[in-house]
Each structure stands twice: as C-alpha cells, then as structure tokens.
Image: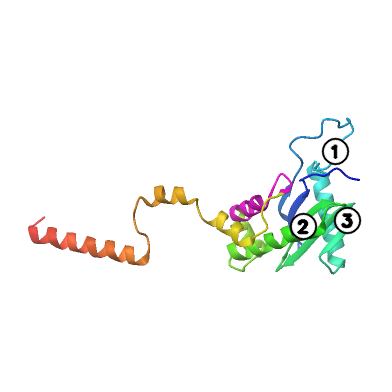
Amino acid sequence: MADITLFSVNAIVILCPSDNSRILAKYYSAPHPPANLSNNGNDYPGSNPYPNLKDQKAFEKGLLEKTAKVAGDVILYDNRCVCYKGESDIQMYIVGAAEENEILLYNALLALRDSLNILLKSSVDKRTIIENYDLVSLAIDEICDDGIILETDPIVIASRVSKPPAQDMTNIRGGIDLSEQGLLNAWEFGKMKLSERLRQGL
C-alpha cells in the first residue's frame, strides 16, 4: 500500500500540438522529502519525476505523440496517470502518480479549463494564453500549490485571479466612485466649477 499524501499533482502542462511547443509547464515536488529517504532519489510520494529540463522536454514530446493517437481524457503514460483536454489549438495536461485518483485529477483539469474560459472570455488558444500569461499562471497557482490541489471551483478561481482583495480595493479607489454614473457626476461637477470660475473672472 502506498503512503497517504496530499501531494497528488506532479505537473500541470499546457502544450501546443501544432508546433510541439511548450506554452506553460509547472512541475511540482514535495517541499520536504520523507526523513527515511535513501540517497538514491526521487521515488517518494510528491516527488518530481522529471527534475531537469531535458527529462521534462522528453516527457512532453512523448506525451504529445501519445495523446495525438488516443481519443479520451485519461491515459497511463510513463507510469503516470495523465488527464488531458484539448481546447482550440492547445492541450492541457495534469500529471499524477500511477496510483493517484484520476477523478480528482480530472476535476482539477476541468477547473483549469473552465477558469481559463472565464478569465480569457472563451478565447483559450496559444496566442491568448501567451498574452495573458500572468492570469493563466495565477489560475494554476490557485488550483494547485506544490502538488496539492487547493480549489476546483472555476468561478472561485477566476474571481480570486481577476479581482484584488476587498480590503485593497478601498485603498485603490480612495472613496471615488468609478462607475459610469460616478464618472458622469464628476464631469458635471467639473463643468460647474469651471463655469463658476469663468463667471468670477478666474
């Protein structure tokens, strides 16, 4: 029986199948390896199975080749459970250990897809993701932190990414109403003050 752990995600990867390029990739490992770990490696729950760029690129290339041939949502590849979804010209992947709960991984993948659809206004493609790289990266960070799935509700994820915290909003606005009516009121106030000054002779 495998050790029980909160670390369920080894990687979240967004790739472009048309040119075999990486758009965004985050690989995770547990921040603290187990105390009884032997010197030979990274074979413990929550470890990063692809610690360097060369291994990551080889894994991603093989993953693209495998998922191009297979129709489905979940595969077992390189002794890893991989959930994937295509959207426009990209493929999104969430990678977990072979014994990981694929329903949990798939729900996290759906949360990523749906939150990106909300944030990017249903225009989830390579160009839009690159232009909004900060929002995409923040959305992934809201879903998963160090391999631990934190949130799977796309509406909550999108609201956390797109809006500053409420306590900061009062500092930013400084009590100014930035709605359309508020701007019209400010315009009328400015016109009134200008006409008063002109009547007084400046």
Q: Amino acid at mark 3?
A: Tyr
For the point 30% across and 66% down, the residue is 184
Read off the residue under disc 1.
42
How far from the left and from the top, in percent, is residue 133?
Answer: 61, 54
Residue named by callout 3: 77
Of pointers 3 and 1, the one earlier in the residue sequence: 1
Q: CA distance from mark 1 to mark 2?
A: 23 Å
Image: magenta residue range: 134-148
- Distance from disc 3 to disc 2, alpha carbons, whole Å, reads 17 Å
Q: Amino acid at mark 1?
A: Asn
Q: Which residue is mark 2?
A: 104
Residue 134, placed above or below residue 69: above
Is residue 42 depicted above or below 39 in this figure?
below
The one of 144 and 54 positioned closer to us in this rendering = 144
Q: Residue at x 61, y 51 (%)?
A: 138
Q: Nearer the viewer, mark 3 or mark 2?
A: 2
**SS class, disc 3:** strand
Q: Residue at x 82, y 58 (%)?
A: 102
Q: Main secondary structure of the magenta part?
A: helix
Quadrant of the rendered image containing residue 69: bottom right
Tell me: 137 left or right of 101: left
Rendered-image quadrant of the C terminus: bottom left
At a point 81% along the width and 54% down the height, the residue shown is 60
Whether residue 20 appears in this view of the structure is no
Which mark is first along the chain, 2 or 3? 3
